[in-house]
Image (spheres, grey):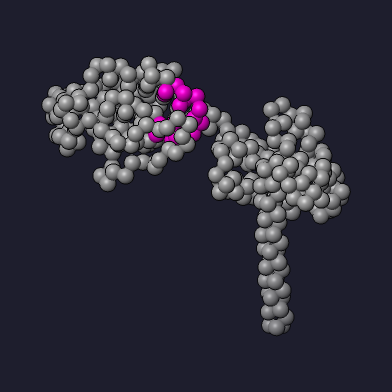
Amino acid sequence: LQVLYKVAKTIASERDLKGLAKKVVRLAGNAVNADHGYIFIKHPEKGELTLGGSYEKGQGEPEEGSTDEGPAVAPYKEGPMISRTIVKRVLRFGRAIMSSDASTDDRFRDRGSVVMKQIRSVICAPLVAMDQLCGVLYLSTSKIAEVFTTEDLELVTAIGVQAGMAIQGITLALAQEKNYLELVGSLVAAIEMRDPLSRGHSERVSTYASGIVQALGLSRSRNRRVQLSALLHNIGSIFLEPGELARDNDEAVDKKRIELASKLLEKMQGMSFLLPAVRHHRERWDGKGYPDGLAGEDIPLEARVISVANDFDKVIENATLKDLGQAKRIEVAKENTTL
């Protein structure tokens, strides 16, 4: 019960797929005293298994509240020590398998597997959610005195059900998030068609801002918020007149664009959480920015990140245009010389 409670707590607090896999396999491995453990996650579309997390005896359990998840894959030189036959059997029938002595087990002995000669006992349980198999949890031990029991099998099977539901939930959330970003990106691209000079600007700013957030070590949820805010930071342009769009450096037009974007996001259901970053990305640290004259730490961090990414893109764009202009001048000069 204590182990299942810890797994439930991990599932409730973890939103990263690999982070969840690493913590769950570590908890399961420690619970049954396994030497090695692996979680393989099934790709929702391709159906292929990828190693999501691994465990090696001696790593210990994650401390309460710890964010150190360790390496993505344990450093085994020869790769994961698993029996593909056992894994395939679990995937085929969707049921957990336990072998108290894998080297003499009639189900696997005729395979002549080198792995079976190195390990004594194996448990492989499916990760299942709503009748959908989304991976396997594989644990093994090489010591005769520490073979797995029926109780171990029941516990690992229960962990597999918990982990399977969590993995499916995270996978669906990631797919929805991807679709949402693509939808917003398409909307922004349609808006920028009105102004050819700004085409691709919002997408580039979003990419730069996401990189800054990663460098700062911020959470994935904040990264998503920054990406969306950066994509929509110019959404107010949809309401500007063609003549106003041409006055890109006009502060009055810029203020109007921000006010229009703020009003739009306020009315859009589920988008208000993006409002602070979009509204305040033109504020300045010294308080001389707009629209509200915020200063220092009063400016939301997401807005500051977008401001830096926005200015960086403009610097790169101006430099590119300058280089193109110089190249054009050289080309004209060559033509004149030839003439």
Q: Is residue 199 visible?
A: no
Compared with 276, 197 (above or below) is: below
* Left or right of residue 29, residue 222 in this image: right
- Whether the magenta-drawn stretch holds residue 338 is answered as no
Q: Is residue 14 visible?
A: yes
Q: Quadrant of the C terminus?
A: bottom right
Q: Nearer the viewer, residue 113 or 16?
A: 16
Q: Quadrant of the N terminus?
A: top left
Q: Nearer the viewer, residue 338 or 39?
A: 39
* Residue positioned 78% across, 33% down in the render: 264
Q: Nearer the viewer, residue 327 or 142?
A: 142
Q: Main secondary structure of the magenta part?
A: helix
Q: Quadrant of residue 81?
A: top left
Q: Quadrant of residue 291?
A: top right
Q: Which residues are magenta?
A: 6-23
Compared with 90, 291 (above or below) is: below
* Left or right of residue 254, residue 218 in this image: left
Provide residue 70's location: percent of width, then percent of height. Answer: 40, 40
Provide residue 15's location: percent of width, then percent of height. Answer: 51, 31
* Residue positioned 85% across, 48% down in the render: 253
